[in-house]
Image (tube, helix red, strand yellow):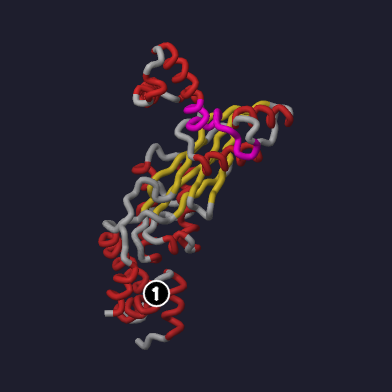
Amino acid sequence: MAITAQDVKALREMTGVGMMDCKKALAASDGDMDKAVEWLREKGLAASAKKAGRIAAEGMAYAGVIGNVGVVVEVNAETDFVGKNEKFVDFVKGVAATVAACAPADLDALMECKYNGTDLTVTQQQQEMVLVIGENIKVRRFARFADGVSVPYIHAGGKIGVLVNLEVTGGIDVIEIGKDMAMQIAALNPRFLDKSQVTQEVLDEEKKILLAQMDNDPKMASKPDQVKEKIVVGKLNKFYAENCLLQQTFVKDNEVTVEQYMNAAAKKLGGTVALKDAVRFEKGEGIEKKQENFAEEIAKLAQ
């Protein structure tokens, strides 16, 4: 059967696969469109196994409210270019919708859920995306808040995704408050949400470091221990202000803390608000990226 350019174009539009691969698929399937799609899927699954070992540290972090459920996810790809691909972005949003609808207990459970709007599992849809995109793609992590009021924020087109979860009374609109807090989290990446979350182990380690610094300072080493202890207490307040969201100086008004801003803004609206939780995902965070020599890569392609 003769294969026309129109056939190749139609298959490409159906699958998102390159023209040459579509032509090969049609040739191997005697022009049968359904068999060609199956052929590409088979090849794609084989390719995904080869690609699975390649480092995926790009992609995007996405946060959104779907129904009344707040969701933040990170999905990785190999290149920043793919992170901007419309099909990839749609896949990420579909993963978020699946998290909202399926309420999975963990990542393994999510991968076995039916991907939003399809009969495929998330694992199978991920494999489909490897076929379409041509890179290793991996759903990495998610968080989900079903209660309270969730406010999402996405920074730099998906470099950072933040989801703030608030407890609200008085029926007030806290979207602006939540957004301001989410932007603070995106910018400063606090270790803790509130000083009450700082463990005794962390405090003991910080005290140990501060006392050691004073012992190594000729001006401080000779001071009595009780004086040193008072100085340490003062410095711990600075530690809270640097590492705990609610105790941080609010970036949009350095006269108040985030907690003071939150309470005052809610009171002005006629209600109250409390921070229940917040999650910050930065794409590729903690993933060791492979260092590529771009000139060498181009040289290899030219051979």
- Range shown magenta: 238-253
Q: Mark 1 points at which residue?
A: 18
> Which of 279/215 is in front?
215
Say which residue appears at 48% left-offset and 61% top-offset.
Answer: 84
Describe the element under mark 1 as helix, strand or loop: loop
Say which residue appears at 29% left-offset and 57% top-offset.
Answer: 52
Say which residue appears at 40% left-offset and 12% top-offset.
Answer: 224
Whole-percent x, y for residue 27 in the image: 32, 81
Residue 28 as seen in the image, left or right of residue 77: left
Give above or below for 123 relative to 227.
Answer: below
Whole-percent x, y for residue 2 in the image: 37, 88
> Which of 79/73 is in front?
79
Q: How crowded is mark 1: few (under 14 residues within 10 Å), some or many (20 or more)?
A: some
Whole-percent x, y for residue 137 in the image: 37, 57
> Which of 230/221 is in front?
221
Give above or below for 174 relative to 208.
Answer: below
Magenta stretch contains residue 250: yes
Say which residue appears at 52% left-offset and 35% top-offset.
Answer: 146
Report the number of discs. Answer: 1
Q: What residue type is labelled 1?
A: Gly
Magenta stretch contains residue 298: no
Residue 260 as seen in the image, left or right of residue 225: right
The quarter of the displayed image where residue 128 is located: bottom left
- Residue 302 in sight: yes
> Which of 210/5 is in front?
210
Q: In which quarter of the image is the C terminus?
A: bottom left
Whole-percent x, y for residue 236 in the image: 47, 23
What is the residue that sits farthest to the bottom in this orientation? Answer: 2
Give above or below for 230 relative to 140.
Answer: above
The quarter of the displayed image where residue 262 is located: top right
- Residue 116 in sight: no
